Amino acid sequence: MFKKIDHLGIAVEDLESAVQLFRDTLGLEYAGDETVAEQKVRTAFFPLGESSIELLEPTDPDSPVAKFIAKRGPGIHHIALGVDDTAKAIAELTARGVKMIDSVPRDGAHGAKIAFIHPKSTPGLLVEICQRKED
Ligand code: CMX
């Protein structure tokens, strides 16, 4: 079902300074930013091999990412696993007894169809299932 690690999501307080670090200091390729309004985050992508690093800055104090930073500080927020079909993956995982946060796919960055597994079904790690638009 899972093809690869699609991306690692990293929560940051300030996107501009984090982009400077990853692009200018670490020298990673920068693929631009995108606001995902429905999830109250601004994202910046850095393709790296077959995966990417995704920086996440909250756009609102009510944003889940703002709450995450307040509780745990900046750092790895989620790991995203690539699939061909998010709806099918939700059905398969649910049938295997995995607790899902999302029972239907929602829109992620770059038109991806995404869903989250509940951290209660994993060792405290937030796992995103991600179907890329071009897939
Ligand atoms: N890591 C570990 N645990 C986490 C977590 C994280 N990043 N985020 C939430 N949790 C835990 C919470 O502590 C909570 O645990 P308890 O039930 O024990 O208290 C549980 O998961 C449920 O969290 P919640 O916030 O109460 O549940 P919601 O359904 O309101 O939201 C979630 C869950 C994951 C969707 C939300 O917290 C979130 O992070 N949304 C932003 C997602 C995001 O990164 N969007 C950008 C996507 C862009 C892209 O990749 O394309």
Image (cartoon, grey):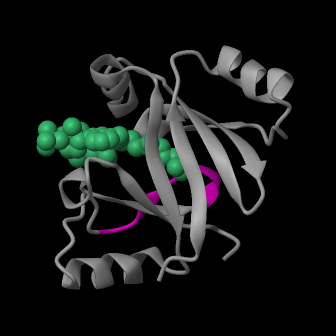
Q: Is residue 96 above or below residue 4?
A: below
- Residue 76 position in % (x across, y down): 47, 37
Residue shown at 60%/61% (left/top)? Answer: 6
Which quadrant of the view contains residue 70? top left
Which quadrant of the view contains residue 17? top right
Where's the C terminus, which quadrant? bottom right
Residue 38 in view, yes or no = no
Q: Is residue 51 magenta?
A: no
Residue shown at 58%/15% (left/top)? Answer: 14
Q: Nearer the viewer, residue 126 or 106?
A: 126
Q: Which residues are magenta?
A: 104-111
Q: Along the horizontal axis of the image, is 9 left or right of 54?
A: left
Residue shown at 21%/61% (left/top)? Answer: 121
Q: Nearer the viewer, residue 28 or 104?
A: 28
- Residue 134 position in % (x across, y down): 70, 72
Q: Nearer the viewer, residue 1 or 100?
A: 1
| Ligand 1 - quadrant of the structure image | top left
- Residue 49 position in % (x across, y down): 78, 58
Q: Along the horizontal axis of the image, is 22 left or right of 69?
A: right
Q: Is residue 95 above or below residue 27?
A: below
Residue shown at 42%/40% (left/top)? Answer: 39
User: How many discs appear?
Assistant: 0
Which quadrant of the view contains residue 77? top left
- Residue 22 position in % (x across, y down): 74, 28
Residue 25 in view, yes or no = yes
Q: Along the horizontal axis of the image, is 114 left or right of 103?
A: right
Q: Along the horizontal axis of the image, is 17 left or right of 90?
A: right
